[in-house]
Amino acid sequence: MIAKVLPVAALMLCGLAACQSGPPPTKATSAWWSHVAFLASDSLQGRLTGSEGYALAATYVADQFRSNGLEPAGADGYFQPVSYEVQTIDAEHSHLALVGGNGNEAAFALGDDMVLSAGVLQRTRVDAPLVFVGYGLRVPEAGYDDFAGIDLQGKIAVLLSGAPASVPGPLQAFARAETLAKTLEAMGAAGVLSIQTPSVIEVPWERIKLASQQPGMYLSEPDLRRYHAPALVGAVNPASAPRLFAGAPQDLATLTALADQHQPMPHFPLAFRLRATVIADHATIKANNVVAELPGGDPTLGDQAVVLSAHLDHLGTGRPDHGDGIFRGAMDNASGVASLLEIARALHESATRPKRSILFVAVGGEEKGLLGSRFFAAHPTRHVGELVADINMDMFLPLFPLHRLVAFGADESSLGDDAVAIAGRRSIGIVPDPAPDHLIFVRSDQYSFIRRGVPALMFEFAPAPDGDEVAAQTAWFRERYHAQADDLLQPVDLRSADDFDAFLVALIRRVADQAKAPSWRDSSFFRRFAQNPLK
């Protein structure tokens, strides 16, 4: 039986210490954990977008919305159907090789040496020279352009992760997410290969190799794709990458040192061509976003909506790397959906209705490139043109008590001030993004709303600078991120999860009730999208 939660009025009135009185929650008594336990259970088989397990998860969320008294707000009841194109790379029958100046081929194996992005419609045949383009960034706002004076017609760009010190994290993130694909297509490039430097690697290559065996997806609607034409897009194993730089003016070790120091990069042709034959299977599937509404109580402000979002999908199943081959995704992101459901219940049970409407949106396709949220942001099922904010929850990692939060996007809009104000009342510190080169800002669903001009935030627990919390978070990413060890047996601080939900309830109430809608800061690069949304 699901344990009762404090009504929102109590959550807002009690201080953090008061909210922590009484016995700590357990996995048997925590309402939040009950949702995590179902969504990450064996029966859902990892919630791969379009799978039977995903459909069961979507039905569960819709049933919870219904039982909490929320209005259906999809295109079909609580559901918004989304069409995806599915591509599965046949690594066994595909062929890659490096071709030297003498015409000799050296195998460059799919899996061991590099992987191809199944989320981009791959070219079936490529035979193209390789050109090193530094970081692969074009950022005119910072006066930086790795592509200036380079001929990429019919060639493959090779780039390193990172950015020069002159390019702020948000601009780096935007250039990676938006400008890169457009630049490559405009320059006639045949494709792009990326290499991660050790400082930004989050998971071991063996796990990346396993993930590449799964199907990738892109939206059926052509205008919503990053790449509009087939391209060879892949990532190179850092252990194999030095082979690409044999005979080049600078070796990879030297370039990696420059990247670690955030220095500008040289650009030069490499001594090899990449010859590729790519075999892939294709299919079309449908999967639902799940959308519910708590209508606003104010006759004027109720026309506007605050979106609370979380992704429902995970990675499905694969070759066992821990246990039985199910990627359960307990923290990524059953945890965020569980918070979505508990916050929805708390707000519905409130004695006073928020002035603005609240849309609760559980999306698919996040693990395939933020696809479900991109579709929803482009085609909102309610309050078209009146979405004023998005608060996104993705893998917030309640591994230790809640004392500090990273608020991704806080520097971009007045939502950062709202977060700081609510956090201060609860003795929570809001701290800067500790790793901007990891590009978290554009790697979860809040970015789909940002690119449509809607201010947005996403939160992650921040460990104390010294001690066990840093070790716990580091170990989680090393052992559990996108691994089958992200399961129901891992240790979780259930009280801190409840504290996080209480923080979000208060934040959402503040944003929904204040007279002025959230606004972009004058200094924000992203404020331009309020007038000119991206497709």
Image (tube, grey):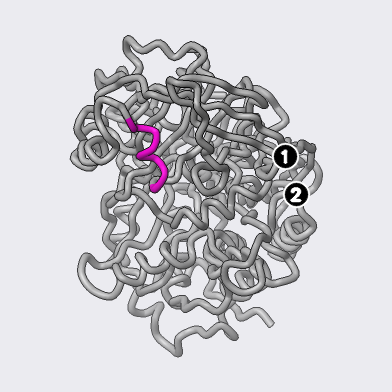
Q: Is residue 209 above or below residue 478?
A: above
Which image quadrant for residue 271?
A: top left
| Image vertical order of residue 407 relative to residue 228, above or below | below
Residue in view at x 39 percent, y 37 percent: 243
Q: Residues within 10 Å of mark 2 (few under 14, many from 20)?
A: many
Q: Is residue 240 magenta?
A: yes
Q: Which residue is more in the foreground, 508 or 319?
A: 319
Q: Is residue 452 visible?
A: no
| Residue nearest the observer in this picture, 264 or 182 | 264
Residue kind at label 2, given as amino acid type? Gly
Tell me what residue is drawn at x 55 percent, y 79 percent: 489
Q: Is residue 471 above or below residue 133?
A: below
Measuring 66% from the left and 72% from the top, which residue is drawn there? 324
Quarter holding the N terminus?
bottom right
Q: Is residue 369 left or right of residue 13?
A: right
* Main SS category, magenta section: helix
Residue 392 place in picture, x, y as percent:
50, 50
Callout 1 touching callout 2 (CB < 8 Å): yes
Q: Mark 2 sits on what residue?
A: 50
1 or 2: mark nearer the eye = 1
Q: Is residue 350 left or right of residue 91?
A: left
Q: Could you tell me which residue is drawn at 58 percent across and 63 percent down? A: 329
Q: Which residue position is annotated with label 1? A: 86
- The boundaries of the magenta stretch are 239-246
> At which x and y percent is residue 282?
76, 36
Number of marks present in the image shown: 2
Q: Residues within 10 Å of mark 1 (few under 14, many from 20)?
A: many
The numbered mark at residue 131 is: none
* Secondary structure beneath label 1: strand
